[in-house]
Image: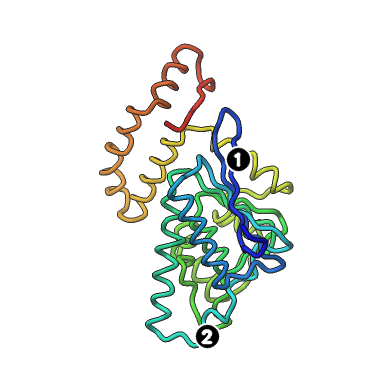
Amino acid sequence: MSDTTPTRLEREIVGDGAEVATLTLASPPLNLFDQAMFDALVADIAELTARPPRALLLRAEGKVVSGGVDVHTFEGLTAEQGAELWRDLFARICHPLEALPCPVVFAAHGLTLTAAFEIALACDLILAAPKAKFGLVEIVVGLTPSMGGPQRLAERAGSGRARELVMTGDLYDAATMAQWGVVNAVHEDLDSAATTLVHRLAQGPTRAHAATKKIVEAWRSGGVAHADSVTPQVSGELFATEDLRGAVRSFLELGPGNATYTGR
């Protein structure tokens, strides 16, 4: 991987052999989403899809998480080209990221704007440092966030809050985002907290985590009735996994909290 690659994908083995992946935005000082950044993320997410870890951490290096999208990306686009851009980013970044069969955690240590915030909203959990700030500020170029930000923000915080954040283009601090339910937790030592959480999730019942994601996705697309309709099959398949069988034996023989998991 060359030094000019704007992202960095690393894998490590933790605990009893669980693989954790870390995907870093590595183009400081602003980690702008230009074509090179988008292309690198597409390649990284394709690799993660082909060989999923047992947990994934998304983070950034530098003073800010991201200053947003390089506005040159939008210059001169026709309506048809603009629509194709968003279709492509949904298909190759947001949707496959959400579909990864493992927990995905986003760690925001500083300013997190536009595309970076939308990608965070496509993750399972968002952690933030107290000084982090979040914004969907596309109104400055006459645009609305188009990588899923408004709808995923509405899912977490309600439609009124989503409209407020998008229409004002204001920045919101980590404490406010936690109060709204957008950020799951705020930590002074974000790096340590994020690492601890991702390692814990990676050593858990990965197939059960994947099932949880499927059930929640069913609810998102069709409500409680649709989620209820898919749960018996999705959850029933877990009884064929080594992890469930081993955890049941461990519980019966040793009590709760003693099971180990392999992700199978």
The x, y position of residue 34, in whole percent, is 57, 73
The x, y position of residue 183, in whole percent, is 58, 54
**Where does the C terminus fall, quadrant-wise?**
top left
According to the image, label 1 marks what residue?
12
Query: Which residue is depicted at the point 43% across and 62% down?
Result: 92
User: Tag 1's secondary structure?
Assistant: strand
For this view, does 21 lie left or right of residue 85?
Answer: right
Disc 2 from disc 1: Cα separation: 40 Å
Within 10 Å of disc 2 (Cα), the crowding (few <14, some 14-19, many 20+) is few
Q: Quadrant of residue 24?
A: bottom right
The x, y position of residue 172, in whole percent, is 63, 65
Going by the picture, which residue comes out furthest to the top? Answer: 253
Q: Quadrant of residue 26?
A: bottom right
Going by the picture, which residue comes out furthest to the front? Answer: 2
For this view, does 149 lie left or right of residue 5?
Answer: left
Query: Which residue is depicted at the point 27% across and 48% down?
Result: 225
Within 10 Å of disc 1 (Cα), the crowding (few <14, some 14-19, many 20+) is few
Q: Label 2 is placed on what type of residue?
A: Glu
Q: Is residue 236 above or below residue 170?
A: above
Label at residue 254: none
Q: Nearer the viewer, mark 2 or mark 1?
A: 1
Front-most of residues 231 and 160? 231
**Where does the N terminus fall, quadrant-wise?**
bottom right
Q: Earlier along the polypeptide chain: callout 2 or callout 1?
A: 1
Query: Which residue is depicted at the point 62% across and 70% down?
Result: 32
Label at residue 75: 2
For this view, does 194 lie left or right of residue 51?
Answer: right
Q: Label 1 is placed on what type of residue?
A: Glu
Label pair 2/1, CB-CB below 8 angstroms: no
Front-most of residues 130 and 57? 57
The x, y position of residue 201, in whole percent, is 54, 38
